[in-house]
Amino acid sequence: MKAKVFQALVSQLGDLSAVQREALIAALKRRLPLSEAVDLIDSRFGADPCCGHCGSRRVGGWSSQAGLKRYRCKDCAKTFNALTGTPLAQLHRRDAWFSYAQALADGLSLRKAATRCGVSLDTAFRWRHRFLTTAKDAKPKVVAGIVEADETFIRKSAKASKRLVGRAPRKRGGTAKSGLSSDDYGPVLIVRDRHGETTDQVLPDLEGSTFVRVLKPVVASDALLVSDGRSAYATFADHAGLLHIALNASKGERTYGSYHIQNVNGYISRLKHWLHRFKGVATHYLPSYLGWRRMIERNSDMTPAAILMQALSHVPT
């Protein structure tokens, strides 16, 4: 708000009714988060600006728009701001971004997040997956040392899909077919080392070749792999030339000396307990939720500012 406008407003405060003053206070309060979010975005970006189109750092100031500074790239000649090329580009209601980031930190359902932030359910849905775009792909490049691996099974869901492919629709409240090998469940591979580095992958099947394709790029060549007795792990270990300890839980093998898979199993337990609050996660969006959970595990004290900064990471082109 410009100084002259503010002074004119102050001079008229005495003429406002009680209802008008309350409305003004409410309006000013709604503006505070917008200023805070914009100031944070601009200050962080302004410290090391780069072109949101080509990535060049040969940039200069240009103008400002909607509270954000605009820059002009000296290489591609395009203009941009701190949001250009990020998942939050073109999103409105910046006044609610901090509140929504806090809703992510609190793990709120869509309906609760929408109510807290004063946005529609559709907007809350769209924002969730925009805010989680970079978290979805934020995985460690390598897991090393003692590496534990295990698979879990998440019930498949076509929630929010307009078409069901491959099965008849379930009745509301219906139960899935028993047996983890049924078509009602999909496998998710979880890999975690003793330093807490965690990666995961939704699998199309449980074949050894699939495990080789998924695990070879991320498991260090000198790692010691500890898993359950599924043969696909042995196939990968043989292919990668890794030492491998396989525990046969059906025979009561929970540990082998100091080696176990309790670390990764504990993570799986926390993941599934956390997912339960969402009452079924759409299979199509499951990678976003896995990334959300990894973000929570990496940051014991997630702040709205930290979540906002992660969401503002540029999407690789």
Image: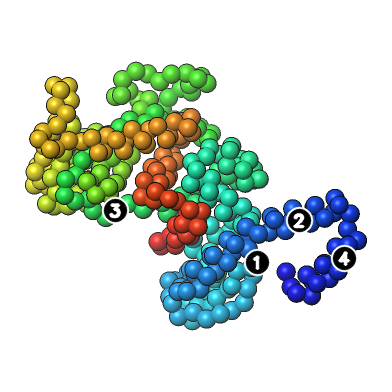
Q: Secondary structure at mark 2?
A: helix
The 10 Å Cα crowd at callout 1, few under 14, some 14 to 19, many 20 or more, is few
Instruction: Report how many numbered discs are placed on residues in the image.
Output: 4
Residue at 17 percent of width and 35 percent of height: 260
Q: Which residue position is annotated with label 4? A: 12
Few, some or many residues within 10 Å of mark 4 (<14, 14–19, 20+): few
Task: Where is residue 134? Give x, y as percent.
Answer: 42, 54
Which numbered disc, 4 or 1, marks the residue closer to the eye? 4
Q: Is residue 10 left or right of residue 104?
A: right
Residue flagged by tag 3: what amino acid is it? Pro
Can you tell which of label 2 and label 1 is closer to the viewer?
2
Considering only order in the chain, which callout, 4 or 2, is on the residue closer to the N terminus? 4
* Residue at 72% in and 58% down: 28
Image quadrant for the N terminus? bottom right
> Which mark sits nearer the N-terminus, 4 or 1?
4
Q: Is residue 47 above or below residue 91?
A: below
